[in-house]
Amino acid sequence: MNKITLIGNLTHDPEVRSTPNGVTVCSFTIAVNRRFASGSGGERPTDFFRINAWRQLGETCARYLSKGRKVAVIGELQARTYEAKDGTTRMSLDVQADEVEFLSPKQQDDGAAPSNRADNAQDMAGFTDIQSDDIPF
């Protein structure tokens, strides 16, 4: 079984492209902090994983993700080889995403999260505010 689960933050905005057959693929890199510090410095090492999300999942990721957002990714680890610019053959480990869950709070158009009651008043339209004394139980 080849399955990996990662939680981390995007290091840059997602890149979207299409294959010659018109299949959408969205690629992004996440930074994942290790659970334990190494050495005496107390700093936790960070690992970087390249994620590929295909088709509808890729389109959704491209639409809603941006640099710094926290995501959980479940997918399959895949090794690939490629030729570098200097002519050497290199290997890369990529994650082919099966599921991507957005963990950062939903942002409004201006990028700020709602912070006061006035913003939430519109969400409560049609509801009546009641006092605890009015509840019969």
Image (cartoon, rainbow, N blue to C red):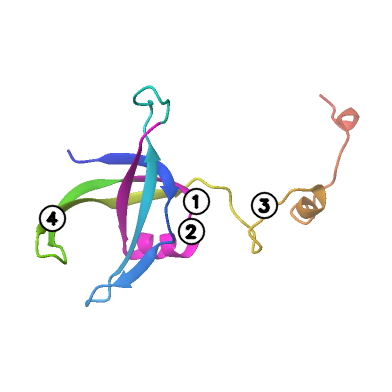
In the rendered view, does 101 fall on the left or right side of 99?
right
The amino acid pointed to by label 4 is: Arg
Q: Which residue is mark 4?
A: 90
Cα distance between the residues tagged 1 and 4: 29 Å
Q: Which residue is mark 3?
A: 113
The amino acid pointed to by label 2 is: Ser
Q: Are there few (<14), some (14-19), or many (20+) residues within 10 Å of tag 2? A: some
Q: Which element carries disc 1, helix, strand or loop? A: loop
The foreground one among 66 and 73 is 66
Q: Which residue is mark 1?
A: 69
Cα distance between the residues tagged 3 and 2: 15 Å
Asked if marks 1 and 4 touch (Cβ < 8 Å), the reply is no
Q: Is residue 114 above or below residue 86?
A: above
Cα distance between the residues tagged 1 and 3: 14 Å
Q: Which element carries disc 2, helix, strand or loop? A: loop
| Quadrant of the drawing holding the C terminus | top right
Cα distance between the residues tagged 1 and 2: 6 Å
Q: Residue at x 16, y 67 (%)?
A: 85
The foreground one among 127 and 51 is 51
Asked if marks 1 and 2 touch (Cβ < 8 Å), the reply is yes
Q: Which element carries disc 4, helix, strand or loop? A: strand
Q: Is residue 27 above or below residue 37?
A: below
Q: Residue at x 36, y 32 (%)?
A: 34
Between disc 1 and disc 4, the foreground one is 4
Cα distance between the residues tagged 2 and 4: 28 Å
Residue 46 part of the magenta segment: yes
Indicate the position of residue 57 as horizontal and vertical percent values: 37, 59
The amino acid pointed to by label 3 is: Ala
Q: Are there few (<14), some (14-19), or many (20+) residues within 10 Å of tag 4? A: few
